[in-house]
Image (cartoon, rainbow, N blue to C red):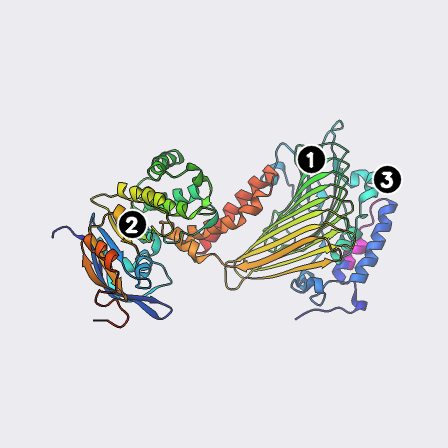
Amino acid sequence: MSKPNMLEIHNLSAGADGKEILKGLNLTVGAGEIHAIMGPNGSGKSTLAQVLAGRGDYSVTSGSVTFNGAPLLEMKPEERARAGIFLAFQYPVEIPGVNSTVFLKAAVNECRKARGEEELDAVEFLDMVKKKTKLLELPQALLSRAVNADFSGGEKKRNEIFQMAVLEPRLAILDETDSGLDIDALKIVSSGVNKLRDPSRSMLVITHYQRLLNYIVPDFVHVLAHGQIVKSGGKELALELEARGYDWLPGVAGNGKP
Amino acid sequence: MTETLSKTDQPPAAASFFAGGIACGPPWLQSLRRQAQAHMEQNGFPTTDHEEWRFTNVASLRQLPLHAAESAARAIGLEEIKPFLLAPDGYCLVFVDGRFREDLSNLPGDGAALRAGNFQSQWENGARELEEHLGRHARTDATFFAALNTASFHDGAYVIVPARTEIEQPVQLLYLAASERPGAAVQARNLIVAAQGASVKVIESYASLTDASHLTNAVTELALAEDARVEHCRLQNENARAFHIATVQATQGRHSHWLSHSIATGARLARNRIQTVFTGEGGEAILNGLYLARGEQLIDHHTVVDHAKPRCESHEFYFGILAGRARGVFNGKIFVRQDAQKTNAKQTNRNLVLSEHAMVNTKPQLEIYADDVKCTHGATVGQLNEEALFYLRSRGIGAELARCMLIRAFTNDAVKRVTLEAARAHLEQLLTERFEELRLSSHE
């Protein structure tokens, strides 16, 4: 009880273009915990991820979020990243013309500067990056290319987890990291994620399918529907959802709101 | 408000001042000058009523206290020009306020393969070699400003490469405006001749040493004979009060290869007319452009590629970044003549608009009279990609740095096409400084 919660979301409502998507969501994530967020399409899973990362397209209409005690919603996206939040994008953005290594070095050093640490020089940086590429079995050659440009779907997702390994966040949000991955790629990505498990690192794993959770085993599973968490449980809840679908849960079916 | 002149008003006062002003040169040049004067009168001083000048109003040029540049009042030494010399090992011809400065130049020696120097040194011996090319290339005097240059240029640079000779060191033509007195006008004139199978890389650069307004009206003619290869890099970074008008005319013989760069970052108003005509089969032209405008700047490029012969290729890539209240103009003309079958012409103009007050007018103009050709064109005007910005920021990169990274990325392709190392290094440096300024100014 004395350990402060890493992430506390209270009564969060948010939306885009005047449409409310999250409707009074509550969630608490302790340090070192892995929480899976599941739910049907359109339930607000990705919106939650984007709101936590600070995407400007979404506006928060009520509620609060604290990250290690600090008010998260007041921070700019880069400040959140520097404070230790990392979003693995569902659709990583291709940025032609921006070299992957230049990009990563800038990211690492901006984060280090913000934490009062010395910036890494080119040699130290490349050393560190080399070790991390092994973790994800990522071909080094990808780093000499432009960010995500002409990467295959699997490479993009691996690259997200690779960036996570490099930036060593406190809270990683994995937004449908399993989508578009074949089983081999899924195993590589999951094993990379598992290697990054740490008592001081929490994760929010957003997924539509239970499959990913066979590899990244969560401590808690939550079901998100209509912008609210309608059911929480342990990892066994994921199996139950796999077997029974979502419709049996109160508040999931379109006409069965509690 | 457009300013129109009736025929009887022409040429306007400023122009007539120059036209009659210079009478130097051998008789053949005198006759060229007279023809040019006639062209000026025919064309008239351009106004926005002229289709070619619709988006670029040069009326404000006539409000400058224009006068032919005099030799600099103060001594300009090597130290002062060093920052502008891009290839320390290369040849260079330095002009200060239009006056050739042999003491600051590095000319090829007597035994060298390359022949280069200033026109005036050739007038006495009749300048036969110049006579063959100067003012002889298609359409050079087709515009008012080009004709004004021919009618009144005082001196200029020639670069002549004999047949089957490759000149490895770059040749730089450096024009510096040093006058403190506002309104100094220089008619810069350059001639680059690459004989059969010859190859050369030329940097043509323009800069100001003071903040005073001035006019540079430049004409560069390039003659590429069969199999000749020329890389021509034009760097214009004059001060924010300057007017810069440029005409570049290439004539390309059979299987010749021209790589042209127009890097325009300076001047209050810059108008660049870059043209090539294929006079033999199998020629190739790559027209690469990068313009960066901010504040009240207007940077205009009009390109003309004339596919007069079959089996030639042209590739145009013009990229612009507009900030502040700046304007960009791009007009790309491609002619494919009736017997120019198997032509391959491609034109791309991309613009990045960084402020709501900046704007771009872009227009492709294709006139195709042959039927077996491949011609494509595309123009885009856009802002920074918000998705990419958010992605970078979500990794801890601050908003300003993220913007700079994306803007820089936009310029990459254009920079990479410059194979002339000295010019590319300079360009990288220039862009770094520009983006740093942009970053600082976004704090305001």
Question: What SS does tag 1 mark?
Answer: helix
Badge 2 amino acid: Leu
| Residue B215 seen in render | no
**What x and y, as percent, mark residue B96?**
68, 44
User: For mark 2, what is the residue?
Assistant: A212
Question: For the view shown, which residue lies furthest in the top direction?
Answer: B111
Q: Residues within 10 Å of mark 3 (few under 14, many from 20)?
A: some
Disc 1 crowd, CA 10 A, few/some/many (<14, 14-19, 20+): few
Above or below residue B291? Residue B56 is below
Decide whether residue B98 is among the magenta residues: no
For the N terminus of chain B, give its image quadrant.
bottom right
N-term mark: 1 or 3: 1
Query: In this view, which residue lies farthest toward the left?
Result: A1
Is residue B9 visible to the viewer in this orientation of the structure? yes
* Residue name at image x 33 percent, y 38 percent: A135
- Residue underneath mark 3: B126
Question: Mark on residue B103?
Answer: 1
Q: Chain of mark 3?
A: B
Image x and y of residue A40, in percent: 30, 62
Q: Residues within 10 Å of mark 2 (few under 14, many from 20)?
A: many
Q: Are marks 1 and 3 on the same chain?
A: yes
Does residue A95 appear left or right of residue A186 in this picture?
right
Query: Label 3 amino acid?
Result: Gly
